[in-house]
Image: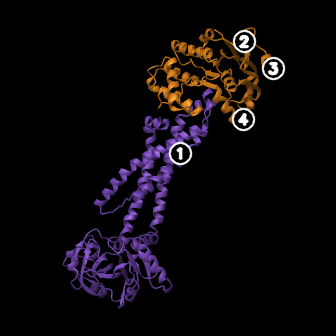
Amino acid sequence: MSDAAEEPTLRCIQIVRSFSDGGAARNVIDDVTLSLYRGEISLLMGPSGSGKSTLLAIASGLLQPDSGQVMARDEGRWVNVWQLSPREREHFRLRNCGFIFQGYNLFPALTARQQLEIVLRWGDGVGGREARKRADEMLALLGLKGKENKKPAQLSGGEKQRVAIGRALIKRPKFCFADEPTSALDWGSGQVVIDQLQAAAHEYKSTIIVVSHDQRLLEHVDVSYHLDDGHLTETDVPADRGGLEPWRAAQ
Amino acid sequence: MNYSLATLWHERPRFLPGIGAVAFSAVLIALQTGLLLGLFKITSLPIDHTRADVWVGSPEVLSVDIGRPIQETYVSRVAGDPRVERVEAYYQAFASWIKPDGGSELCIIIGSCLDDDNLGSLDELTPELRNALTEPNAIVIDSGERRRLGVTGVGDYAEINKVKVRIVGEVSGLKSLAGPYVFCSRPTARLLLRNMTPRDTTTYYLIRCRHKEDAHALATDLDETYKDRHDMTVMTSEDFSFKSRWHWLLKTKAGIALGYTALLGLLVGMVVTSQTLYAATAASAKEYAILLAMGIPRRRVTLTVLVQSFWVGLFGVVFAYPTVHGLAYLGRFAGVNIPLPWNLLALAGAVTLVMALLAGLMALRSVRRIEPMSLLR
């Protein structure tokens, strides 16, 4: 299943993040370190409130940690995501990141094709004809050929999630962050979603991190982490991975 | 493909209040201004419905209805200019109308030449009416002013400045703002206005140029030549017409009233439009948040809201135009003239479009509140 490279592409190093809870600060993420590799799907599991979505937000450059570092490979060099300026971080996400959320969050007025086009046109300034071509190719890849002109209200839940996946993958992102992508779906639709993420990992060599409490995903991912009360409690990581050495070597 | 337009169409019930508010503002501005234009056009009727190219009047005259007498000898100042084809005297002044039942009313006497080739008789005075006016003390009134003048129509007698006059005909569409117009010949006017217009004076000289396009230069040259004497003013009919309307607009403070009403309409329109755009953007906050998470610049979302505001403005203006024309048409049945020249409509459209864009700017606070992290909570 794995087509892993020899060194990680995204590292979260000693991440700490606290939130105020009735006046007292509580560490939602407490000294978490993990490494993610290109071409792999990493699953981050844990009960509600364990901090997995917070960790995803920190790793993806959406939420600043109190301490720790997020290092990402970008154009052949290591980038400390939280030392970038907000504008630079926005550009980093634009170049590298795709997102999938539990709610499909599709524009109700736009067709499946337009949901994908908008990312290319607004983000990368891709021309209309090119954006349309690439959107149609991606929809066909997701088994949505013939549904290009359907609006969200005309699509099933599974189809909507596939459009959302298409929106996340249309740019062929180096990193794809998925928050509970299968939670609202029946297993048949969920299977399609995980298949698409696997295809993205293998074909685009994307680094994919999935946050979920769906146990059925375990057998479909390359690496899994378990987060409990802000701590990584157990991992299912190949023996040759772990520690900070690859990143340190890169420094 | 325009995503803003697609959203607008898909969620038209949501955007309708905004479009309605823009339309309301545009209608209000166009109708208010049109009404005032119509109202004050009445004051310049004697200029607009006659055929003079240039008017010569008393110094610094502000409006056609308040001209003071000028010497008849001034005709020699203008008649000799080779650009002048015809000059004729014209009388206009306020007078006291005594109704048959004894009541009184202020009226405006207009005494003009009645020849077929005249410059000063209003277009509404047909050859038959002009012929009838050649009788001594004969007058023509507007049929809409009968009640105001206390008469029943043609054949009735009344008194103006203690001179008995007889109504020999009626016109329509020449109702006045200050006092009913009373049309007559120049000898009758001289008689009726003998106390206000001394011998050897007239109120205006009307000039027709050999070439219409010389009017402006002629007016400027004459005015410049006799400026130092401070005893007459020379204007083209266009300038005098505008000056008369402008004077009334300022004198009656109607312009200020118009400004306030238009501003109020604009404010209401802007608030409603802004709220509409705000609500629409807030409703799509999660979709926009995903785009922001993916690094799409916030200014793209900002631009989308502004483009939406432009479309809301445009649709509002498009809906407003037939509404304005419909209301103006209905106004005619009530005897209200609401002129809607293209430049007025264009101005009302432009002002409301700018208002819609400002509403879009106001609604941008909803864009600032979009936070990608909200998707992960």
Q: Nearer the viewer, mark 4 or mark 1?
A: 4
Q: Nearer the viewer, mark 3 or mark 1?
A: 3
Mark toward the start of the polypeptide (3 vs 4): 4
Above or below for B39 versus A10: below
**Judging from the image, what secondary structure is the residue with disc 4 in?**
loop
Give the numbered dot on residue A85: 4
**Judging from the image, what secondary structure is the residue with disc 3 in?**
helix
Give the numbered dot on residue A234: 2
Are marks 2 and 3 in one subunit?
yes
Give the numbered dot on residue B360: 1
Visible residue check, residue B60: no
Asked whether disc 3 touches disc 4, contact meaning CB atoms under 8 Å apart, the reply is: no
Amino acid type indicated by mark 2: Glu
Q: Which residue is mark 3?
A: A248
Inter-mark Cα distance, 3 to 1: 50 Å
Asked whether disc 4 touches disc 1, contact meaning CB atoms under 8 Å apart, the reply is: no
Are marks 2 and 1 in one subunit?
no
Inter-mark Cα distance, 4 to 1: 29 Å
Q: Is residue B324 left or right of residue A87?
A: left
| Image-quadrant location for residue B55 | bottom left
Above or below for B127 versus A45: below
The image position of residue B85, as x and y in percent, is 34, 79
Q: Nearer the viewer, mark 2 or mark 3?
A: 3
According to the rendering, which colour does chain A have? orange
Amino acid type indicated by mark 1: Gly
Amino acid type indicated by mark 3: Arg
